[in-house]
Image: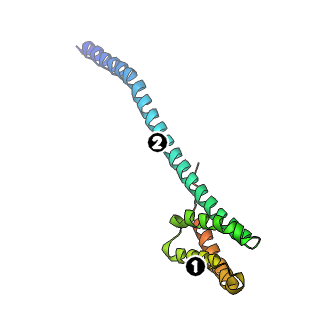
Amino acid sequence: MFEALKNLIANDIVALIALVALVSPPITAIIDNLFKLIAKHIDFKRNVYDNEFNHKRDLFENFLSYTGQLHLDSDRYINGLMKAYFALSPYVSKEDFVYFREYCNLVQENNPDKNQERLTFLLNEHIVPCIKKELRRYKPLRK
């Protein structure tokens, strides 16, 4: 009787091992695919984040580039500055947007002698710090 019980337990253990051997590969594949999906999603979010930052940086650089070229030929570069101004406007906070608007309005007046001091003040005290603040918000996601 003891021998029969021993054989029954041994058969149950063998059956359990066989069942686990059959079930474990699909479970492992499901878990592996789930982790790959999560990794792909994280990578996608990082790419979107990086692309958005690069786009924003390009807009700000474009604005600063046209600002720097205004003293060379304001008639030639004012349209580019205005396009850059409108393109970056969604990325600037309401508080800082006031300074961008005033700066562009003064540039459009096309009176550099009268407005030079105010333009310099706006650029150095408000616009450039705003751009630095916006670009510092970028935190590279871990790879």
Question: Would residue 141 be seen by someone viewing this image from the given angle?
Answer: no
Report x, y in % for residue 52. 55, 55
Badge 1: how crowded within 10 Å, few (<14), some, or many (20+)?
some
Instruction: Determine the secondary structure under disc 2.
Output: helix
Report x, y in % for residue 89. 53, 67
Q: Quadrant of residue 125?
A: bottom right
Q: Which residue is mark 1?
A: 102
Residue at the extreme left: 1
Q: Residue 38: which disc?
A: 2
Question: Would residue 100 be seen by someone viewing this image from the given angle?
Answer: yes
Marks 1 and 2 sit apart, C-alpha to C-alpha, by 46 Å
* Residue 72 in the figure: left or right of residue 54: right
Labels 1 & 2 near each other (Cβ < 8 A): no
Badge 2: how crowded within 10 Å, few (<14), some, or many (20+)?
few
* Residue 104 in the figure: left or right of residue 5: right
Q: Which circle's residue, 1 or 2, is located before the other in the chain? A: 2
Identify which residue, 87 or 26, lies in the foreground.
Answer: 87
Name the image quarter holding the N terminus.
top left
